[in-house]
Amino acid sequence: MSVPRNRILALMETQSRIFNTVFNPSGARQGTKILHQRLKGPSVAAYYPRRIGTFGELARLYPEWEGLNIDEWHREEKIAGLKARGKGAPKKKRTAPEATKHGQRKRK
């Protein structure tokens, strides 16, 4: 003698309520397996050392120290190399003296 399906589903539902499990008669993917896993964030964060400070913060605290900002030093070296090869930025355009700038001529 076989047991009807709705009777089995009612038994499974009662069992899931008693043992605090998920009742999923259709077998649909719900992600509960992933949600019940331990979080990985704290263990990943603990793997890397804590960040104490950056070079920018140190340069602001101690402006008399030179050579703290390595990125800025590399940028200046690159610009010097480009200028040496003639590939640097062009010179700024020179402007006329203040007197001729406003449409006035120099008087002799």
Image (tube, grey):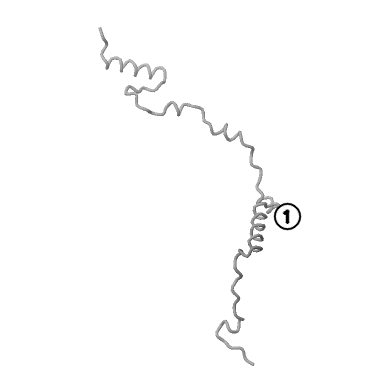
- Amino acid type of the residue tagged 1 in the rendering: Glu
Give how far across and how far down residue 63 sits, in percent: 71, 56
Name which quarter of the figure residue 73 lies in: bottom right
**Residue ID at (63%, 65%):** 86
**Residue ID at (54%, 34%):** 41
Instruction: Relative to 46, say whether 53 is above or below.
Output: below
Q: Secondary structure at mark 1?
A: loop
Identity of the residue furthest to the front in this view: 85
**Residue ID at (61%, 33%):** 47
Give how far across and how far down residue 32 sits, in percent: 42, 27
Question: In this image, 18 relative to 52: left or right?
Answer: left
Residue corresponding to mark 1:
66
Identity of the residue furthest to the right in this view: 64
The quadrant of the picture occupied by the N terminus is top left
Asked whether 45 or 11 is in front, the reply is: 45
Name which quarter of the figure residue 96 lies in: bottom right
The quadrant of the picture occupied by the C terminus is bottom right
Give how far across and how far down residue 29 sits, in percent: 37, 28
Question: In this image, 19 relative to 8: left or right?
Answer: right
Q: Quick one: label 1, few (<14), some, or many (20+) residues within 10 Å?
A: few
Instruction: Relative to 86, say whether 102 is above or below.
Output: below
Instruction: Count every numbered label the image shows and give the total.
Output: 1
**Residue ID at (41%, 21%):** 21
Asked whether 29 or 15 is in front, the reply is: 29
Asked whether 38 or 19 is in front, the reply is: 38
Identity of the residue furthest to the bottom in this view: 108
Instruction: Relative to 50, say whether 25 is above or below.
Output: above
Name which quarter of the figure residue 42 lies in: top right
